[in-house]
Image (cartoon, helix red, strand yellow):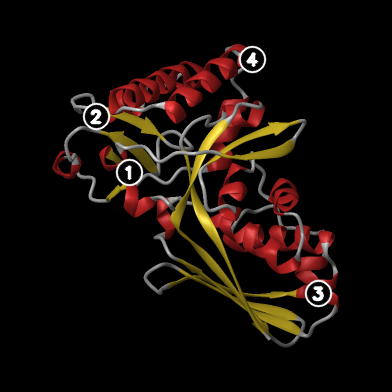
Amino acid sequence: MKKTFYSNGKLLITGEYLVLDGAKAFALPTKFGQNLIIESGINQEISWKSYDSNGSIWFEETISFLEISSSQIPESESVKTTLIEILHQAFLLNPDFLNNTNGYTISTQLTFPRKWGLGTSSTLINNIAQWLQIDAFVLLNNSFGGSGYDIACAQNDFPILYHLVNGKPIVEKVSFNPAFSQNIYFVYLNKKQSSKTSIARYQTNKAFKREKTIDEINKVTQTILNATNLDTFAEAITAHEALMSHVLETSTVQETLFSDFDGAIKSLGAWGGDFVMAVSKEDPTAYFKSKGYETILTYDEMILS
């Protein structure tokens, strides 16, 4: 018995944080993702290995079926306890995966460097859900939490608009193939952000008017989707950054790090880390490298199309 599953990585282009409160978020699946390989095992346990994109093992552990089925999840957070919690919630949704086997040998393989933040957790959760034939959105909600846009990207090979209605995910396929895609770049900031921490910080800020801000963000998102030229697109992402700067009570990444950049820069996902999107009429690679940022990907290199 050998089964292989795959899920796409993700980039959240608009609606970060506010997607939790019903905003329409525009997201793009990436050409990078993660595989999950399931084989037979022994001893009522899972022998687990996780490989980074360079082939190195970044996590290796043996987990007993009892650890997974037990409700006694350790309070201290680690890669192992997080994995056990995901598998425990999967067990609650489909107990047969432990009841009908002697064990498993499981491996995961990223096709992007783990530090990039393109969805190590969401691709894993979606792969596990595929394997066990359970609802990935429910598994995410019961284990890791979050809006679920990353699960939608994991499952789809096209641009999406994503929002929540009464907590339920709504995924819409949208058209996004701009003539100026060669002017869109993705730059890795090498500052991994914790989604959980960022979300918690956002949810404590009650000072802004969510409903009004969500309406404004939705309008900007539509402008971004409908943009027919680079200038309109750049103005819209700058407007989005200004709105979110007010919501999060923090400076934009362009103000903080790239005030002299000739173009527009937008944070993606959790502010302050992972990738930013840069829009420029000229190739900005030399600019970013001069600032110490070595990982710059073009739109075609990053985005599934």
Q: Which is more toward the observer, 1 or 48?
A: 1
Disc 1 to disc 2, how far (Cα)?
Answer: 14 Å
Q: Nearer the viewer, mark 3 or mark 1?
A: 1
Residue beneath the point at 37% across and 44% down: 191
Residue 258: image tag: 2
Q: Position of residue 18 (x, y in %)?
A: 58, 27
Disc 2 to disc 3, how far (Cα)?
Answer: 51 Å
Q: Nearer the viewer, mark 4 or mark 2?
A: 4
Instruction: Rate crowding at label 1 as few (under 14), some (14 to 19) or many (20 or more) other CA atoms within 10 Å.
Output: many
User: At label 4, which amino acid type do we have?
Assistant: Glu
Residue 186: image tag: 1
Q: Position of residue 174 (x, y in %)?
A: 54, 38
Q: Secondary structure at mark 4?
A: helix
Q: Is residue 108 above or below residue 258?
A: below
Give the labeled residue for mark 3.
98
Q: Secondary structure at mark 2?
A: loop
Residue beneath the point at 68% across and 38% down: 170
User: At label 1, which amino acid type do we have?
Assistant: Phe
Q: Position of residue 29 (x, y in %)?
A: 49, 49
Q: Are marks 1 and 4 in contact (CB under 8 Å)?
A: no
User: At label 3, which amino acid type do we have?
Assistant: Leu
Q: Is residue 212 above or below residue 189?
A: above
| Residue 122 visible, this orientation | no
Give the labeled residue for mark 4.
211
Q: Quadrant of the N terminus?
A: bottom right
Q: Is residue 153 above or below residue 177?
A: below
Which comes sooner in the sequence, label 1 or label 4?
1
